[in-house]
Image: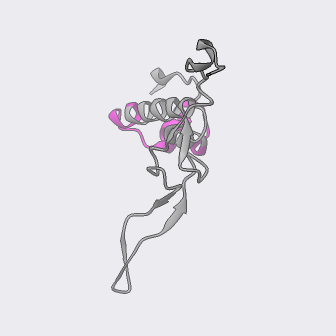
Amino acid sequence: MDNQTSNDRQPKAVGLETVVIICPACDGIGKNFSRPILIKGKVSVAEFPCDVCNQTGQITHLKELWVAKGKAIKQYRLERGYGLREAAKKLNVDASNLSKMERGVIKPKNIYLGKL
């Protein structure tokens, strides 16, 4: 006889930090590749670790939200014709951090995009 109660069989609610999905930046392989370039007549592609998922190939739903918000920030910036450094200066953030926010590597700050 099954000793489990009906409550034990119910799906458990989990937070945004515990549910894991495939990393959209590297498609779950934990690494990214550069665009093909021609070096001395040979096509070369560089491989580098994915900094969105820290080479695990998976991210949490919270991180997925960071990626989505970062893409929106980048799109907003590009639609207005700003380069990364110029936008960072206007938004009063470090260009490196703005780049990381746009890629979802770090949590996007609640920056006031109206400054662009």
Q: Residue at x 46, y 51 (%)?
A: 26
The colour mode here is one colour
Q: Nearer the viewer, residue 44 or 74?
A: 44
Q: Is residue 81 left or right of residue 91?
A: left
Q: Is residue 92 magenta?
A: yes
Q: Is residue 82 magenta?
A: yes
Number of numbered discs on residues: 0
Q: Residue furthest front?
A: 1
Helix, strand or loop for the magenta stretch, by majority: helix
Q: Give the quadrant of the C terminus.
A: top left
Examine the image and state in which quarter residue 18 appears.
top right
Q: Say if 46 sits above or below 1 in the image.
A: below
Q: Say if 113 sits above or below 44 in the image.
A: above
Q: Would you say residue 53 is visible in this rendering?
A: yes
Q: Give how far across and how far down residue 25 sits, in percent.
A: 46, 47
Q: Give how far across and how far down residue 77 sits, in percent.
A: 41, 34
Q: Residue at x 57, y 46 (%)?
A: 53
Q: Give how far across and how far down residue 82 sits, in percent.
A: 41, 38
Q: Residue at x 36, y 69 (%)?
A: 36
Q: Residue furthest bottom?
A: 40
Q: Say if 86 sits above or below 27 in the image.
A: above
Q: Is residue 83 left or right of residue 79?
A: right
Q: Give the quadrant of the N terminus.
A: top right
Q: Residue at x 57, y 22 (%)?
A: 110
Q: Nearer the viewer, residue 102 or 17?
A: 17
Q: Residue furthest right?
A: 3
Q: Would you say residue 12 is visible in this rendering?
A: no
Magenta extent: 76-96
